[in-house]
Amino acid sequence: MTEFWAALGLVAPYYNLLLVVILFYLFLKLFATPAKNRKKVFQKPWTLIFVALIIFIVEELLTVLRTAGLLNIPAHINGFFELGIIILFIYALLLQKDWIKKKKL
């Protein structure tokens, strides 16, 4: 079973990048909404989540390059990327909460 988990750890960044391509397409469709419908959607939190997605793409590319031996950077750098992603997610949630609270008043 140890070999299975090692193999899964080697191919996981590639699967992540494939799924991110699909998510990237969905975000582009979201941001391409017609102007008449754009007033109904509060896009600021989604923009922040999109920036977090870009940070995740950079993190995964660095992981793939490090695994392939093309890049020699320490693994603890990923923690800084993840911290940025979490900060953006929390800020997006707080913005959405504030927007909903203002809409109800």
Image (cartoon, grey):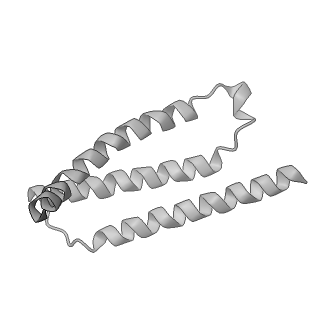
- Left or right of 56 on screen, residue 61: left
Rendered image quadrant of residue 58: bottom left
Position in image of residue 96 (x %, y %): 69, 55
Q: Is residue 61 visible?
A: yes
Q: Residue at x 64, y 49 (%)?
A: 44
Q: Residue at x 43, y 51 (%)?
A: 53
Q: Residue at x 43, y 40 (%)?
A: 23
Placement of the C terminus among the 4 image quadrants: bottom right
Query: Which of 71 and 94 lies nearest the eye of the viewer?
Result: 94
- Left or right of 16 on screen, residue 88: right
Residue extending farthest to the front is 1
Position in image of residue 83 (x %, y %): 44, 70
Position in image of residue 76 (x %, y %): 27, 74
Q: Is residue 70 visible?
A: no
How many labels were placed on the picture?
Answer: 0
Position in image of residue 78 (x %, y %): 31, 67
Placement of the N terminus among the 4 image quadrants: bottom left
Residue 86 vs 96, above or below: the answer is: below
- Left or right of 23 on screen, residue 100: right
